[in-house]
Image: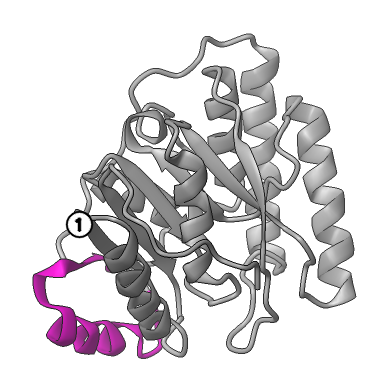
Amino acid sequence: MTPLPPPSRFPFSLSVFFPAYNDADTIATLVEAAFQVCGECVDEFEVIVVNDGSQDATADVLDACRRKWGERLRVVTHPVNRGYGGALQSGIAAATKEYVFYTDGDGQYEVAELALLLKAAEQGAVWVNGYKKRRSDPWSRIVLGAAYRECARLLFALRLKDIDCDFRLIRRDAAQAVALRSVSGTICVELVWGLERMGHRAIELGVTHKPRLHGQSQFFRLAPLWKTVRELTGLLRLRLSGAPVPGARRHHPAPPA
């Protein structure tokens, strides 16, 4: 884990959200960590979990979390699974504070390292993005992930070195200005591409990536991979068409908890 700066107060408000799909074994720990780091670092914050149609005990775990944290924890519930992109769209739409931070609900990133990103944003940075110092996954996922990452960077002329490192802090107005459409993991490319097209360049910081201890990745299954390929192809057509930078994003209203 990266050495953290001593706790300090940052002069902006913060929305933290976690997309969660069948993350009953990890989500309570992440929520706890979010309240701890936010309580140490900012005066005004909110913690949000997007339960994306989970079929395990995620809803029950989140009910217990809400009994502990009360109204300080917001849960957005998708009655059916909308995919990773759909969960990110709902999380970004639900955020109300000056900056938005999100990371995955599977517990492969250290939420405490959010303090590093906040420090980098203190001078007014629009976007701070982590990159995995060392990817802690099976070799097959490392190879496939690297191929996908470099292909996407080449096709969309992206500057960000680690597109699929979902450990991001973005000023809310910038995040909500990207017209996100993807419902698969392609949304990471779409979000980064949209931010870079609008002239925002990320400050990149190395972060810890831990082995997955529970569940399995949805990205490397056949159906999600095929959906990602289709959406990536559509996004590439949009790029080749020379379409203007997207304006205000369109999204479905966040469903009630």
Q: Using the rendered view, name the quadrant where residue 51 is placed.
A: bottom left
Q: Residue at x 50, y 36 (%)?
A: 127
Q: Residue at x 76, y 25 (%)?
A: 157
Name the amino acid type tagged 1. Answer: Pro
Say above or below: 198 vs 195.
above
Which one is nearer the viewer's eye here, 248 or 101? 101
Report whether residue 53 is seen: yes
Q: Is residue 78 magenta?
A: yes
What SS does tag 1 mark? loop
Q: Residue furthest left?
A: 71
Q: Is residue 74 magenta?
A: yes
Say above or below: 148 vs 245.
below
The residue beneath circle 1 is 255
Report whether residue 183 is seen: no
Say above or below: 99 vs 193.
below
Write down the region rendered in magenta: 54-79
Q: Residue at x 60, y 74 (%)?
A: 108
Which one is nearer the viewer's eye here, 132 or 44? 44
Q: How many marks?
A: 1
Q: Dot 1: within a 10 Å radius of its alpha carbon, few (fewer than 14), some, or many (20 or more) residues?
A: few
The quadrant in which the C terminus is found is: bottom left
Could you tell me residue 179's position as x and y percent?
42, 29
Q: Using the rendered view, name the quadrant where residue 237 is placed.
A: top right
Left or right of 147 in this view: 217: left
Could you tell me residue 77's position as x and y percent?
25, 67
Which one is nearer the viewer's eye here, 50 or 26? 26
Give the color scheme: rainbow, by chain, secondary structure or one colour.
one colour
Could you tell me residue 164's position as x and y percent?
66, 52
Q: Residue at x 65, y 49 (%)?
A: 205
Could you tell me residue 100's position as x and y percent?
36, 47
The quadrant in which the N terminus is found is: bottom right
Q: Using the rendered view, name the quadrant where residue 224 is placed.
A: bottom right
